[in-house]
Image (tube, helix red, strand yellow):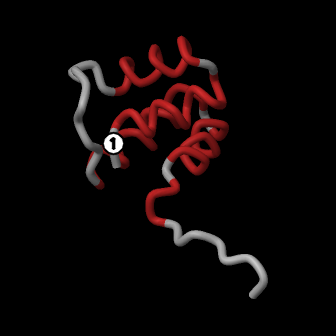
Amino acid sequence: MPFERVHRGLSSILGEAAAWVVLKQIFPAYKGGERLDEEDFKVLKFGLEGLFGDAGVMLYGQVAKHDRRPRVRGR
């Protein structure tokens, strides 16, 4: 998943500036254009949990919807 998509998801919840600060706290070496792999998502989850506690786990659930299948309406 592109890093920018994760940033958009967090910024829709926290606000643009707060999302940037949180992500730079978790991924200090980020320079732009990278993609997050499965290991990065583990780091993201533990980083959000470390910063926000249980609310961080909920934030992660909202942002990391990469492994969920789209909902099909009407079935």
At 39% from the left and 33% from the top, the residue drawn is 4
User: Quick check: 58 above or below 74?
Assistant: above
At 52% from the left and 37% from the top, the residue drawn is 49
**Relative horizontal placement of residue 27, taking residue 17 as reference (left or right):** left
**How many C-alpha atoms fall within 10 Å of the one at disc 1: few (<14), some, or many (≥20)?**
few
- Outermost residue, front direction? 74
Q: Position of residue 38 (x, y in %)?
A: 29, 55
- Count the marks: 1
Q: Nearer the viewer, residue 48 or 69?
A: 69
Quadrant for the C terminus, please. Answer: bottom right
Q: Nearer the viewer, residue 30 or 5?
A: 5
**Relative horizontal placement of residue 30, taking residue 22 as reference (left or right):** left
What is the three-letter code of the residue carrying label 1? Pro
Q: Position of residue 58 (x, y in %)?
A: 64, 45
The picture quadrant where one finds residue 44 is: top left
Q: Which residue is mark 1?
A: 2
Secondary structure beneath label 1: loop
